[in-house]
Image (cartoon, grey):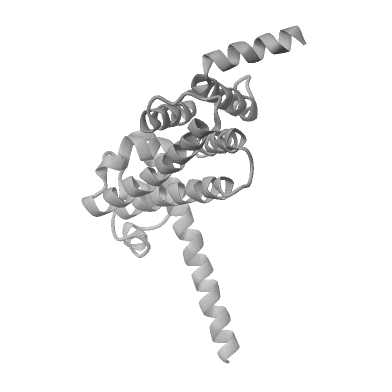
Amino acid sequence: MKKVAINSISKRQLRRDKMRQEIIAVSKRAFASSGYWAASLRNIADELGITAAALYNHFKNKEEILWEIISGNLDGLLKLIMAELSQDSPSASRFKNIIKLHIRYTVVHATDTKIIFEDGHFLSDRYFAASQEKQRTVLHVYRACITELAESGPFVIPDVTICALYALSAVNGTSRWYRPDGKWPVEQVADIVAELILKSFRNSDHCASDGLERSQG
């Protein structure tokens, strides 16, 4: 009997988890198309074929859904870039890989990225502060990478924070114009954008002498 009870609880939890994910998926579409403020929980519930009361069994309010979307996206990104940051590889290669995976992530999760930047300010102070802290952690990773570049020789970094914000702007901006059905595969776009960012930090004198050496060779 005990085993049957455990299995029953497990199945209920699986159903509950599945419904939460379905609510989040439908909410993402609603927030992205109508905006967080205009999106209605009643309409979200109707699309799912459940009552509003049933939806409230999973999330106590609309803000809780918004926070689930934003925190889940940022946690997933942080997990990826922290894993890459821990790799024992040359500083330029590691930073380029972080930029590329960040671009791929924002493109694959373009809806989440849009919600973060367009609707994140609707979060209450507590959730907003937590969201900002996660985003600052991403900035700190970029700053750490750029600090390493500054120490490696071929790069000129006038200000680490400004350069990190510049790189993040280029990365996050890619998800706004990239189209999965366009002519460029995401890997190509990620590689080009990453190379452009690194090139903008390179010492022009070093690049010129390096190019001269290659042409003479």
Q: Nearer the viewer, residue 150 or 165?
A: 150
Residue at the outermost bottom position: 1
Q: Position of residue 88 (x, y in %)?
A: 63, 46
**Residue at 41%, 43% in the rendered image:** 140
User: Could you say which is closer to the camera, residue 89 or residue 10?
Assistant: 89
From the image, which quarter does the N terminus lie in?
bottom right
- 206 relative to 128 in the view: left or right: right
Quadrant of the image containing the C terminus:
top right
Q: Based on the displayed image, in which of its 4 quarters is residue 159 positioned?
A: top left
Q: Position of residue 39 (x, y in %)?
A: 31, 41
List the single residue furthest toward the right.
217
The quadrant where residue 187 appears: top right
Q: Nearer the viewer, residue 81 or 217?
A: 217
- Residue 23 visible in the snapshot: yes
The residue at the point 50 percent across, 72 percent down is 12
Residue 116 image offset from top left, x and y in percent: 37, 40
* Residue lying at the far left of the rendered structure: 125
Residue drawn at x 35%, y 65% as measured from the top left: 57
Q: Between 184 and 79, which is closer to the camera in this rendering?
A: 79
Horizontally, residue 48 falls left or right of residue 100, namely left
Depicted 35 relative to depicted 126: above or below: above
